[in-house]
Image (tube, rainbow, N blue to C red):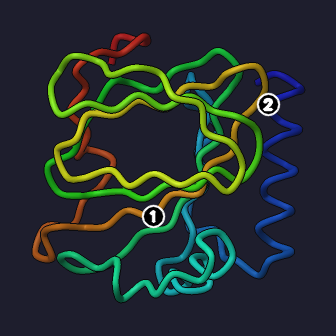
């Protein structure tokens, strides 16, 4: 892992700890960067910190909510993807990122998002997070749409992937 990647992950991990968040899982091995999963019991605290205090009850569609922090490397792209069992809400925490969305498999235009910018992604909506010049840090809440079968990392349908996954 590059020194720069180690540094940004350490910085975000310290920030989350200082904010009182319990990190349930961490993955810094993704080719595009990685993520931190926050304890689901802290969803409201996470929303207070990163989503202007939005009432998490209003975000619930079909069960629980799963808070995460995504870190996307400069010039890296997550897969062009969608999900069967979740919607998502993202808010940029640090850096500038690119996001493409579409209701079809055809990629939409690249739009830039800056700190405090927010986007809501519907279940089934195609999307791609893209690192631009520097590291991007994005807060994400998964809105599970099927209470009997919550979404997980396997609930990713990749339409296109730079890493052959």
Per the image, the residue denoted by label 1 is: 141
Quarter of the picture containing the N terminus is top right
Label 2: how many Cα within 10 Å (few below 14, some 14–19, many 20+): some
| Residue occupying the point 45% across, 64% down | 141
Q: Secondary structure at mark 1?
A: strand
Viewer-side residue, 62 vs 58? 58
> Is 119 rendered above or below residue 17?
above
Q: Secondary structure at mark 2?
A: helix
The answer to whether 93 appears left or right of 8 in the picture is: left
Residue of label 2: 5
Q: Position of residue 41 (x, y in %)?
A: 49, 86
How far apart, in angstroms, are the residues tagged by discs 1 and 2?
23 Å
Q: Nearer the viewer, residue 110 or 163?
A: 110
Q: Quadrant of the C terminus?
A: top left
Residue 163's x, y, as percent?
43, 12
Residue 63 higher or lower than 109, as above or below = below
- Residue 144 in picture, x, y percent from top left: 25, 67
Question: Total label count?
Answer: 2
């Amino acid at each position: 892992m590059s020194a720069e990647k180690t540094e940004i992950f350490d910085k975000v991990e310290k920030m989350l700890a200082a904010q009182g968040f319990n990190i349930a899982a961490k993955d810094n091995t993704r080719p595009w960067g990685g993520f931190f999963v926050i304890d689901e019991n802290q969803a409201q605290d996470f929303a207070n910190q990163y989503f202007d205090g939005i009432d998490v009850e209003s975000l619930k569609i079909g069960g629980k909510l799963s808070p995460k922090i995504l870190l996307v490397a400069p010039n890296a792209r997550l897969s062009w993807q969608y999900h069967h069992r979740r919607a998502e809400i993202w808010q940029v925490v640090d850096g500038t990122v690119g996001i493409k969305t579409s209701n079809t498999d055809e990629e939409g235009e690249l739009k830039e998002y800056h700190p405090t910018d927010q986007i809501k992604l519907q279940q089934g909506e195609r999307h791609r997070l893209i690192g631009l010049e520097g590291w991007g840090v994005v807060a994400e809440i998964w809105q599970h749409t099927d209470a009997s079968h919550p979404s997980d990392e396997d609930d990713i349908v990749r339409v296109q992937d730079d890493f052959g996954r």
